[in-house]
Image (cartoon, rainbow, N blue to C red):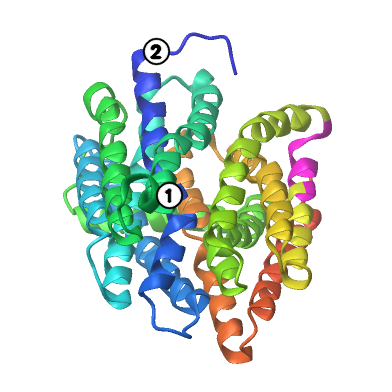
Amino acid sequence: MAHDKMTKQEKSWVMYDVGNSAFVLLCSTLIPIYFKSLAEEGSSVVVAWGYAETVASLILALLMPLLGSLADLKGNKKKFFIGSVAIGVVACAALGFPTSAMLFLIVYVLASVMLNGSMVFYDAFLVDATTEDKFDQVSSHGYAWGYIGSCVPFISCLVIVMFGEDLFGISMGLGMKIAFILTAVWWLLFSLPLIRNVHQRNYKEPEPHLLSSTFKGLWKTLKAIGKDKCLLMFIVAYFFYIDGVHTIIKMSTSYGTDLGIDSTMLVLALLMTQFVAFPSAIAYGKLSKKYGTRKMLMIAVAAYLCIALFAAFFLRSAAEFWVLAFFVGLFQGGIQALSRSEFGRLIPKEHANEYYGFFDIFGKYAAVLGTFLMSFFTQITGNASIGVLSIAVLFVVGFVLLLKMPKE
C-alpha cells in the first residue's frame, strides 16, 4: 500500500468495491448451492448455471459499449450508475423469493447484469475520483479492499445459512432470504459514499446525432486496435485467458456440487481464496517490477492451465478442492491487476477511456465462451471433467498469443 494519504473522493470510490464484492462472492459460492436445492432432482447444476451466466454475459457484451459511451456524456455517468445499482440491489434482495429454478435464474440474470453494468460506470469514475499519478494506487486499493471487505457480510450470511437452524431455529430457505437482503443492504450502503462525494469531472458534450456519433466513435477505436499488431494480439490473448479465469471463478462451486463435495467445504475453501488473493496481488505487482509484466503474466496463465488440468483429472474430494482454491487465490489478483497495467502501457493515453471501455468488455464479460464450452461439453458427454478440460484450451491459446507478441 502506498503511503500517500487518500482523499475523501478516493476513499469513497474504493468503498464501492467493498460493497459490490459481497454480492460477487455470494454469486460464486452460496448461490449455485442454493440453486441446486431449487433445481429438479437429477438435473445438472453445471449446465443450467453455465447457460444462465452465458446469457448474462452476452446481454452485457451487447449493451455496455453503447451505454458506456452514452454515460461519458455530461451529467450522465452518475445517473447510469445510480440506475444500475438501484435495480441490482432490488433484484439481489428479491433472489430469496422465487420457488422455481427458472424464475430464480431470470431474477439472477437481471441482478448479475446490473451488478456488472454498475462496475463499468464505477471503473469510469476512477478518472473523476483521482489524478492520473495515483490511478494505480487507488485502483489497487479497490481490488485489495474488495477481497477483504466482501468477507464481512459473507461470513454473516454463511453463519445464518449453514448454522441458522441450530443457532436461531431458522430453515435454510429463510436463511437464504436473509442472506440476500443482508447482501443487498451492504451493497447499497457502500455505494452511497461514491454517489455523494464523487462527481463527473471528465465528460464529452452531446453531439447533434447522438446515436450515430456514438457508433462512429466506437468503430474508430475498434479500427485503431485492429491496426496495432501488438495491442491486437494482447487484447485477443487477454480475451482467451481471462475468459478461462472468470469461468473457473464462476463455475467452481457448481462443478464441486456436481462432484458431490460437501457445500460447507466448498464455501470455506472459496473464502480462503479471498484471503490468499489479498497479499498475493500485492506481491505479484512487486515481482513484475523485477521480472517484467509480460513474463509474470505468462507465468500466471501457465499456472491457470495447470489449475484447469488439475480440476479435470484429479479433483474428486474436498481436500483437492482446497488445494485448487489456494492456487486460484495465488494468481487471481495478480493476473487481473497486471493485465490492466500492461494494457495501459500499450494504448494511446489521450484515448484511455475509449480503450478501457473495450478492455472492460473483454475482461468482465469474457466468460461467454468459457461457461458455454463447459456447459456444452458437460451436456453432450455427460462428464463434467470433459467440460473443465475444454477451459484448458483457452489458457493454451492465451499463452501462445502472449508468447508470439512483438516486444513493442
Query: Is 321 within the magenta?
Result: no
Residue at 80%, 43% in the rendered image: 295
- Residue at point 32% right, 58% down? 171
Q: Quadrant of residue 154?
A: top left
x then y, percent, for residue 206: 20, 42
Estimate the x, y position of residue 366 in percent, counting from the top left: 52, 61
1 or 2: tag closer to the N-terminus: 2
In the image shown, does 309 or 41 lie closer to the viewer?
41
Name the quarter where the N terminus is drawn.
top right
> In the image, what residue type sits under mark 2?
Thr
Q: Residue at x 34, y 50 (%)?
A: 115
Picture coordinates of residue 239 (x, y %)? 59, 59
The amino acid marked with disc number 1 is Phe
Query: In the rendered view, would you say 145 is above or below 360?
Result: above
Q: Which residue carries the number 2 mark?
A: 7
- Residue closest to the far right: 291
Residue matched to label 1: 163
In the image, 91 versus 261, the foreground residue is 261
Mark 2 residue crowding within 10 angstroms, few (<14) / some (14–19) / many (20+): few
Q: Which residues are magenta?
A: 291-299
Q: Position of residue 85 (x, y in %)?
A: 25, 45
Secondary element under disc 1, as helix, strand or loop, is helix
Residue 114 visible, this orientation: no
Helix, strand or loop at mark 2: loop
Tell me which residue sits at (27%, 60%) in the image: 95
Q: Nearer the viewer, mark 1 or mark 2?
A: 1
- Residue 196 is labelled as none
Above or below residue 300? Residue 348 is above
Residue 66 relative to residue 386: left or right: left
